[in-house]
């Protein structure tokens, strides 16, 4: 019942000692000279709240141990921003501005992060292009429980997920519409720059199968690039790979050995390389890292987006949001959750002691009065994810909110809880996933999740009624992702996720032996 990709913050922010070439980082706020991600996060959240709710800002600024008590301020951000569109915009703009004001780029000396792309402009990378040799997939098919679903089978599964409360109706409607228009899956006219090309939850494989031109960005690690290159060879798409200037790889193994860009340390060079691409293109951010590094890579991706949007008008943005965050949700989700709470029983939970059951809490104890009516707040944050994860994911939501208000096409969709490697390597989280179904939460396999989310991205690109369009008719910016969320059941479960997380893990331990 946790995030798409979850790893708790552990240990120090990074090894001690000076590292003048560390690239993207937060400004130092400690006597040791080392950045403190929690301290910066607290200051940024308090500043964003100050614009719309000074009382909540004071509470955030007064938190003594941010790592242990950061959950409530992140909920306050959503509550404060959900009252009207202007409040959401103010939170997003202030949050982004404050975060970038506390961000730097280190290469010998430090410069403000948003100046890094113009401080170093010399080209450092060339491109190698791979043309896939396979035929394009004609229609949408979805891997599910060891087999592949086609056409009517996909439709039935979508409708079943809606009936079970696993996804919102808008999600199913968007995928149904895509199935109605198989021509939309001819992506031969689409270019997507994929930051985090090797990511388990990224759209790379699907985009290539549907014939897109993918400009791949990931770390210079041969094992990543060998896999990415094999995908491209067996697809109908086109892959563009960055290689250092002067390199001349003669085969795929040699290409994998030299390909890649370190987004954190080579941000200026990446910008120079991407900026020369012919447009239009989508900049898709699918990066992930453990602990404080996640904030650094998210900041690097955001600085790249900021620079490209300032320079050209043919760039759109795409993100995947985690289900384990705080969201303003549709009234229907609140009503269904409350019906389930009223009808709850111990079926399947009879082995639990009553004291454990007594700790369960309803998902929506109250609602928030907003300009558009009563709104439920789905608080699905999990403490174990850590403040770095929360900040990195909130940064992306702020960028999507601000960009759409500024007239930029921006697709941000909520992906379901998924058994990615970063989750299952944590025994406690793997156990919680194994027990999640007892509380109405479905955990997806990576191949199912990334195919569905790639399909939703295509719908956002092709449909004239797409919520990613800046002219979409929305009462509030949050509606862009809440209406077609694939939350895995977290929003419509009877129970507040944190109240059942420990029990889910205990039951999962029994299930997994």
Image: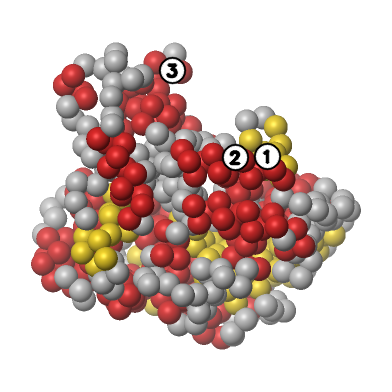
Label 1 Cα crowd, 10 Å radius (few <14 / some 14-19 / many 20+) = few
Query: Are the residues at dot 3 and dot 2 in contact (C-beta closer than 8 Å)?
Result: no
Specify whether residue 260 is in view. no
The mark lying in front, picked from 1 and 3, is: 1
Q: Label 1, secondary structure: give it.
A: helix
Residue 83, by quadrant, is bottom left
Rendered position, 481 above or below 91: above
* Residue 477: image location, x then y, percent: 39, 70
Label 2 Cα crowd, 10 Å radius (few <14 / some 14-19 / many 20+) = some
Compute the Cα span from label 3 to label 2: 25 Å
Query: Are the residues at dot 2 and dot 1 in contact (C-beta closer than 8 Å)?
Result: yes
- Left or right, 313 with reference to 257: left
Q: Residue at x 28, y 59 (%)?
A: 375
Label 3 Cα crowd, 10 Å radius (few <14 / some 14-19 / many 20+) = few
Q: Which residue is mark 3?
A: 511
Q: Quadrant of the N terminus?
A: top left
- Residue 382 or residue 307, whichever sits in front: 382
Task: Find residue 157 and name its label.
Answer: 2
Compute the Cα span from label 2 to label 1: 6 Å
Nearer the N terminus, badge 3 or badge 2? 2
Q: Residue at x 62, y 81 (%)?
A: 314
Q: Label 2, secondary structure: give it.
A: helix
- Left or right, 12 with reference to 426: left
- Residue 179 or residue 423, whichever sits in front: 179
Q: Label 3, secondary structure: give it.
A: helix
Q: Which residue is mark 1?
A: 153
Q: Residue at x 14, y 55 (%)?
A: 63
Q: Residue at x 62, y 62 (%)?
A: 459
């Amino acid at each position: 019942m946790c995030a798409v990709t979850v790893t708790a913050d552990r240990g120090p922010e990074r090894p001690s000692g000076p590292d003048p070439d560390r690239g993207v980082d937060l400004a130092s706020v400690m006597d040791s000279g080392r950045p403190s991600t929690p301290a910066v996060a607290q200051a940024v959240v308090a500043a964003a709240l100050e614009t719309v709710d000074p009382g909540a800002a004071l509470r955030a600024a007064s938190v003594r141990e941010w790592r242990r008590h950061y959950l409530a301020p992140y909920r306050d951000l959503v509550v404060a921003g959900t009252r009207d569109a202007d409040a959401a915009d103010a939170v997003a703009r202030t949050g982004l501005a404050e975060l970038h004001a506390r961000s730097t780029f280190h290469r010998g000396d430090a410069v403000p992060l948003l100046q890094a792309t113009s401080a170093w402009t010399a080209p450092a990378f060339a491109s190698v292009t791979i043309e896939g040799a396979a035929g394009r997939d004609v229609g949408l098919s979805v891997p599910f429980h060891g087999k592949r679903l086609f056409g009517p089978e996909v439709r039935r599964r979508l409708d079943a997920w809606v009936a079970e409360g696993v996804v919102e109706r808008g999600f199913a409607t968007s995928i149904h519409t895509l199935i109605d228009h198989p021509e939309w899956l001819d992506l031969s006219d689409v270019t997507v720059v994929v930051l985090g090309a090797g990511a388990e939850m990224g759209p790379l494989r699907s985009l290539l199968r549907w014939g897109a031109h993918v400009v791949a960005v990931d770390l210079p690690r041969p094992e990543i690039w060998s896999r990415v290159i094999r995908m491209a060879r067996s697809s109908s798409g086109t892959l563009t790979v960055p290689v250092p200037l002067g390199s001349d790889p003669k085969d795929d193994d040699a290409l994998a050995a030299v390909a890649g860009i370190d987004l954190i340390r080579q941000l200026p060079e990446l910008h120079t390389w991407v900026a020369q691409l012919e447009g239009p293109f989508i900049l898709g951010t699918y990066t992930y890292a453990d602990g404080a590094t996640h904030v650094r890579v998210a900041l690097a991706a955001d600085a790249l987006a900021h620079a490209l949007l300032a320079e050209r008008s043919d760039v759109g943005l795409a993100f995947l949001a985690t289900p384990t965050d705080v969201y303003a949700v549709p009234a229907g989700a609140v009503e269904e959750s409350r019906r389930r709470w009223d009808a709850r029983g111990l079926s399947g939970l009879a082995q639990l002691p009553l004291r454990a059951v007594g700790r369960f809490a309803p998902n929506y104890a109250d609602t928030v009065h907003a300009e558009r009516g009563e709104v439920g707040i789905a608080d699905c944050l999990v403490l174990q994810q850590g403040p770095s994860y929360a900040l990195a994911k909130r940064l992306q939501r702020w960028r999507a909110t601000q960009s759409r208000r500024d007239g930029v096409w921006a697709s941000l969709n909520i992906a379901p809880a998924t058994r990615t490697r970063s989750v299952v390597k944590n025994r406690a989280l793997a156990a919680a996933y194994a027990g999640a179904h007892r509380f109405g939460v479905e955990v997806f396999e990576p191949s199912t999740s990334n195919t569905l989310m790639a399909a939703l991205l295509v719908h956002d690109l092709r449909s004239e009624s797409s919520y990613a369009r800046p002219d979409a008719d929305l009462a509030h910016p949050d509606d862009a992702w809440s209406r077609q969320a694939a939350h895995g059941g977290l929003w419509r479960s009877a129970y507040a996720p944190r109240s059942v997380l420990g029990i889910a893990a205990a039951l999962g331990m029994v299930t997994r032996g």
